């Protein structure tokens, strides 16, 4: 019997209209499923559509087509009343903690707001719930009545994490939660997120990042995005150790190493990412791919291949890639 899915995205399209009738095709025919208690990384270059997927999953961005379900609830067609219930089940932590907090609210008030809007909790019980959550994230009582400008970047992100967790959600979307922080502070936040997996084993997380090392550290599975599509998906160790899509291989090759000579055969992508208003025919990656075959990759969309149990790749030559060493 398969594990129940907490988040199910099927054939999702997200298009943004531009003047002149053009469309920015931010997300195209994307499908992704997160099982209950699973942490899945969503990776790719800037502009690949990662953040759009996360926001659309919680209906912060309107979907053009497709289906999204959170714990069986149809997100796209849900009424406002149903969405209020869903806000308790699903929360998001944004990339920039500085712009995520109201500068006129104390952190106690900021963390209380979700409880006030979505639960009957009031008075002493509400104050204790907020205080316990903040303290568990390393913010003792003396911080609770301070304003955001009185906190460091790492402390602000802890407040944002507390604001999400205080509702005890089933699904957490994390959009680059450490990228705006100093390196030493990043390590602290990652430690909190790692401990969170142990403390709340049933919590499902969609972790959006461009940092492959962080995804390997935190996630069970990884989905690799390019031009609005998932081009490879599978268990994080298997994908990173034995990628079967040339784009995944290029991303892994670009990870910095202490000495440049350690990777003499580093893959270097040529050209720029195509415009999302004019996506190439065939495989969207063929304009930058070193193994693209003329007459095939530039004309025929690649099929979905399953080169191994739990693996998926959108590539004509997925099986051949598995036979190549990772540089």
Image: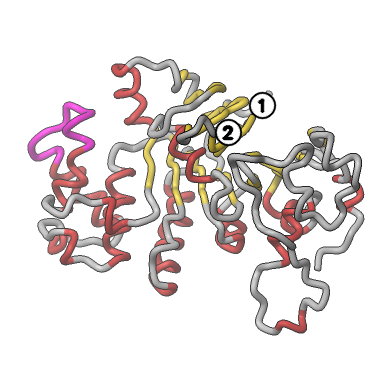
Q: Residues within 10 Å of mark 1 (few under 14, many from 20)?
A: few
Q: Which of the 4 image quadrants contains residue 185?
A: bottom left
**Is residue 41 at least partly visible in the picture?**
no
The residue that label 2 is drawn on is 35
**Figure check: 64 above or below 193:** above
The picture quadrant where one finds residue 264 is bottom right
Color scheme of the displayed model: secondary structure
* Inter-mark Cα distance, 1 to 2: 9 Å
Secondary structure under tag 2 reads strand
Residue 183, image x, y percentages: 44, 73
Q: Is residue 34 above or below residue 271?
A: above
Side of 211 relative to 252 (left or right): left
Question: Would you say 292 lies left or right of 312 here?
Answer: right
Residue plotted at (16% across, 45% down)? 128
Give yes or no for residue 119 being in the magenta stretch.
yes
State left or right for residue 180 relative to residue 46. Answer: left
- Residue that label 1 marks: 2
Q: Are marks 1 and 2 in contact (CB under 8 Å)?
A: yes
Question: In which quadrant will I find the N terminus?
Answer: top right
Vertical relation: 257 (above or below) 151: below
| In front of the other: 56 or 217 | 56
Q: Which residues are magenta?
A: 114-126
Quarter in which the C terminus is drawn: bottom right
Q: Quadrant of residue 173?
A: top left
Which residue occupies 54% across, 38% down? 24
- Image coords of residue 56 (percent x, y): 46, 33
Say if residue 211 shows up in the picture.
Answer: yes
Q: Which mark lies nearer to you, 1 or 2?
A: 2
Residue shown at 67%/51% (left/top)? 236
Q: Residue at x 88, y 45 (%)?
A: 317
């Amino acid at each position: 019997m398969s594990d129940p899915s907490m988040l199910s995205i099927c054939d999702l399209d997200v298009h943004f209209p531009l003047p002149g009738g053009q469309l920015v095709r931010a997300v195209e025919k994307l499908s992704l499923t997160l099982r209950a208690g699973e942490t899945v990384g969503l990776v790719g270059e800037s502009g690949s559509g990662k953040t759009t997927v996360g926001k659309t999953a919680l209906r912060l961005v309107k979907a053009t087509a497709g289906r999204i379900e959170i714990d069986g609830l149809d997100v796209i067609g849900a009424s406002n009343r149903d969405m209020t219930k869903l806000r308790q089940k699903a929360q998001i932590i944004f990339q920039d903690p500085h712009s995520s907090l109201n500068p006129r609210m104390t952190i106690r008030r900021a963390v209380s707001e979700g409880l006030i809007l979505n639960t009957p909790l009031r008075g002493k019980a509400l104050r204790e719930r907020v205080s316990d959550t903040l303290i568990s994230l390393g913010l003792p009582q003396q911080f609770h009545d301070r304003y955001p400008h009185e906190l460091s970047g790492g402390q602000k992100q802890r407040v944002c994490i507390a604001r999400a967790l205080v509702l005890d959600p089933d699904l957490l979307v994390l959009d680059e939660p450490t990228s705006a922080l100093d390196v030493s502070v990043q390590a602290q936040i990652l430690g909190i997120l790692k401990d969170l997996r142990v403390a709340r084993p049933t919590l499902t997380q969609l972790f959006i990042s461009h940092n492959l090392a962080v995804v390997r550290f935190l996630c069970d599975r990884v989905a690799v995005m390019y031009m609005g599509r998932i081009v490879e998906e599978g268990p994080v160790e298997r994908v990173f150790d034995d990628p079967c899509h040339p784009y995944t291989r290029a991303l892994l090759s670009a990870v910095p190493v202490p000495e440049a000579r350690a990777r003499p055969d580093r893959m270097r992508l040529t050209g720029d990412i195509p415009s999302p208003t004019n996506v190439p025919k065939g495989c969207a990656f063929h304009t930058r791919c070193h193994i693209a075959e003329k007459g095939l990759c530039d004309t025929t969309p690649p099929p979905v291949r399953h080169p191994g149990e739990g693996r998926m790749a959108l590539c004509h030559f997925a099986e051949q890639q598995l036979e190549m060493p990772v540089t």
